[in-house]
Image: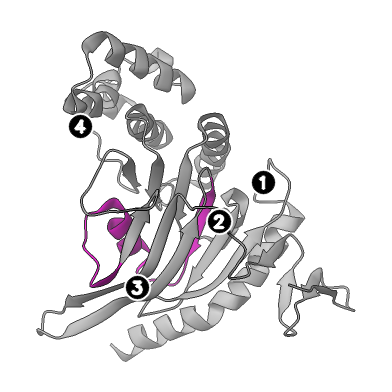
């Protein structure tokens, strides 16, 4: 793809079709990924029945490849199917057509190689922190000594080693999400699926968890697919940002985020790149708002 400098003070470039692209981000060409992907969403579509009995097309022909160790962020307006896409990858839903391939094999069921983390952390209040982290390992049949070692390892990784005997109600919101991350990582999944995990947190806690998640990702080498409404959060964290259209959800555009790490939300380059991606997304948000207004 040929990029040409835009002759304005605006920090953008022009691609070969005259589209503006922010400096720090580049459109991903269709043949950019030649290596075998960790995940391949192959022409994925999903229809579901409405309360009136009609079949609604939620996702339409999503074709997306994810490299091993990549941090992919997915953004889009409300109702575009971002969370549904994660459910399909996790094996919680079955696509109407197309397939999810992981390491070249079709995903049919749920599995411990793909773990989801939600906005609601889903921790068990009657268990201690260490018992919550240990729970998935027990379900996998991991022997007790190895379970305890792995629990200590991942609690230390999220800086909660001193809170292993605490109960969930004794923790702050940010600490609860770190327990949820430790519990997910302890089962050593290949892919971490995160559905707006920080949306309910205050801005200061969210910023701290951005730093923590980036550090954990760098240390573990996990593949992460992160859904968010916050475009600046996506640019702050992602190697790549995929933009979905409003209903039905289609892959509108992909942006490669070529900015040095560590990044911060207040960085000029992060804010500028997010602003331009949001401009690309605004048309889809307006469609979403128009539907809400009609209802």
In-front residue for pair 73/28: 28
**Which callout, 1 or 3, points at the residue further toward the start of the chain?**
3
Q: Which residue is denoted by mark 3 in the rendering?
A: 79
The crowding category of the residue bearing disc 3, from other C-alpha atoms within 10 Å (few below 14, some 14 to 19, many at least 20), is some
Q: Quadrant of the C terminus?
A: bottom left
Mark 3 and mark 2 residues within 8 Å of each other at the beta carbon = no
Of all residues, the one furthest to the top in this rendering is 145
Q: Residue at x 30, y 46 (%)?
A: 120
Mark in front: 2 vs 1: 2
In-front residue for pair 176/257: 257
**Res 124 label:** 4
What's the magenta region? 70-98
Q: Quadrant of residue 278?
A: bottom right
The crowding category of the residue bearing disc 4, from other C-alpha atoms within 10 Å (few below 14, some 14 to 19, many at least 20), is some
User: Under tag 4, what secondary structure?
Assistant: loop
Q: Which residue is denoted by mark 1 in the rendering?
A: 264
Q: Is residue 162 left or right of residue 187?
A: right
Mark in front: 4 vs 2: 2
User: Under tag 2, what secondary structure?
Assistant: helix
**Which callout, 3 or 2, points at the residue further toward the start of the chain?**
3
């Amino acid at each position: 793809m040929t990029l040409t400098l835009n002759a304005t003070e605006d920090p953008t470039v022009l691609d070969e079709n005259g589209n503006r692209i922010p400096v720090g981000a580049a459109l991903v060409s269709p043949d950019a990924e030649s290596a075998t992907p960790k995940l391949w969403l192959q022409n994925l579509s999903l229809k579901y029945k409405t309360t009136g009995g009609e079949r609604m097309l939620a996702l339409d022909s999503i074709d997306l490849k994810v490299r091993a160790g990549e941090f992919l962020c997915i953004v889009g307006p409300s109702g575009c199917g971002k969370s549904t896409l994660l459910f399909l990858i996790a094996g919680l839903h079955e696509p109407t057509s197309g397939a999810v391939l992981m390491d070249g094999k079709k995903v049919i069921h749920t599995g411990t190689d793909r773990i989801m983390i939600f906005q609601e952390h889903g921790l068990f209040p009657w268990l201690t922190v260490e018992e919550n982290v240990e729970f998935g390992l027990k379900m996998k049949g991991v022997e007790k000594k190895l379970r305890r070692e792995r629990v200590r390892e991942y609690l230390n990784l999220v800086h909660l080693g001193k809170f292993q005997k605490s109960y969930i109600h004794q923790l702050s919101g940010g600490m609860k999400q770190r327990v949820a991350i430790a519990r997910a990582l302890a089962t050593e999944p290949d892919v971490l699926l995160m559905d707006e995990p920080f949306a309910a947190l205050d801005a200061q806690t969210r910023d701290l968890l951005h730093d923590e998640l980036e550090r954990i990702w760098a240390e573990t080498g996990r593949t992460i697919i992160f859904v968010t409404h916050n475009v600046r959060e996506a640019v702050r964290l992602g190697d790549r940002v995929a933009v979905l259209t409003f209903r039905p959800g289609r892959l509108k555009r992909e942006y490669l985020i070529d900015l040095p790490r560590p990044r911060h939300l207040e960085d000029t380059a992060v804010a500028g790149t997010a602003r331009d991606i949001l401009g690309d997304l605004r048309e889809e948000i307006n469609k979403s708002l128009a539907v809400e207004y009609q209802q």
